[in-house]
Amino acid sequence: MSWFARLKQGLKKTAENLSKAVPWGGDPEEVLEELEYALIAADVGIEATEEILAEVRQSSQKNLKEAVKLAIMLQLEPDERRRKLRKLGFKPDATKKFVAPKGHVVLMVGVNGVGKTTTIAKLGQYYQRAGKKVLFAAGDTFRAAGGTQLKVWGERLGIPVIQAPEGADPAALAFDATQARKARGHDLLLVDTAGRLHTKHNLMEELKKVKRAIGKAEPGEPGEVWLVMDATVGQNGINQAKAFHEAVGLTGVIVTKLDGTAKGGVLVPIVRALGVPIKFIGVGEGPEDLQPFDAGAYAEALLEGAA
């Protein structure tokens, strides 16, 4: 099955709701009125929905679906870039590209239960297939199974895993792993961290400590800090995301479990609230179900069924 077919299947619940709610092919103003309610129900957000409708009304596109698609794609750009594209009349980039991390260390963060460790394994495979020499750091030292789960993935993929005993200092482990990456000549280190609630001040402070430790071991790192979010939480996860952003400075977001929600429009408010791009999205459990985010394919799949 192609990635676009997987994506369509993953966004099926959202697309079906949009298709049923919107009388595509009818009077344009009636279509836009129903589209407004449907997009808000899909968790796109009120402000973004209003901007989408304004873009469509001003569009020179004769095909309503194409105008809506382009307007959604604009909303998936961080604010500054979206304003620039509007001003210069450029179209958003609709092409899925290889996601090349800045630097050599990616710190992975998120709350409990979002599938962070599994996502790290899928990312490891993605970069491994691209010819990168990958190293894992099992920084979840709180759960007994935290390091074990990543170690099993590492053995399956042939990716070494830096571990520490349960209860060990995760910052010390991150420091050692960063030094090990340099010493062993690996291209990329993916650092797992224990899932934590954004409201737990001590745990967020610990996350800051982990980031500082990586920087001490190798100045300028981590080059990336990626938040893993569960799409089924919808806009309720935005406050969580903001807290992580304030604590460690996110550079990107990975959204998982899009196949389990009818609120697939949540990617829009995520980008708007954080001002950072969506890096990858996940629509299933298989390794091929996590892919680089493609705004064009996403908007197309979201509007599947539109005339």
Image (spheres, rainbow, N blue to C red):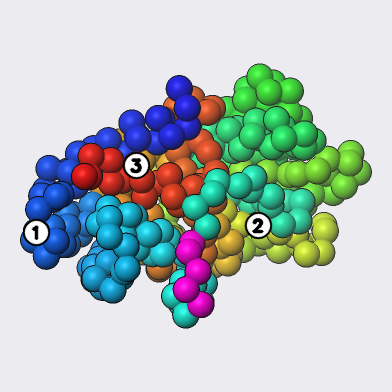
Q: Is residue 215 left or right of residue 73?
A: right
Relative image position of residue 48 (x, y in whole percent)? 30, 68
Q: How far apart are marks 3 and 1 (CA)?
A: 23 Å
Q: Is residue 29 visible?
A: yes
Q: Which of 283 and 161 is in front in this view?
A: 283
Q: In which quarter of the image is residue 56?
A: bottom left
Instruction: Examine the rendering and report whether any part of residue 168 can be seen.
Output: no
Given the image, on which type of amino acid does mark 3 rest? Ala
Say whether disc 1 or disc 2 marks the residue closer to the N-terminus.
1
Q: Magenta segment range?
A: 88-92
Whether label 1 touches label 2, CB < 8 Å = no
**Residue at point 65%, 30% (across, down):** 125
Which is more toward the observer, 298 or 167?
Answer: 298
Which image quarter holds the N terminus? top left
Q: Nearer the viewer, residue 65 or 35?
A: 65
Q: Is residue 90 magenta?
A: yes
Locate residue 221 relative to residue 112 in the image: left or right. Answer: right
Mark 2 and mark 3 lie on one chain; the one further toward the N terminus is: 2
Residue drawn at x 50%, y 69% as measured from the top left = 90
Q: Name the residue under label 1.
A: 27
Q: Mark 2 points at which residue?
A: 224
Q: Quadrant of the C terminus?
A: top left
Spatial CA span between label 2 and label 3: 28 Å
Identified by mark 1, the residue type is: Asp
The x and y percentages for residue 11 are 31, 39
Are there few (<14), some (14-19), or many (20+) residues within 10 Å of tag 1? few
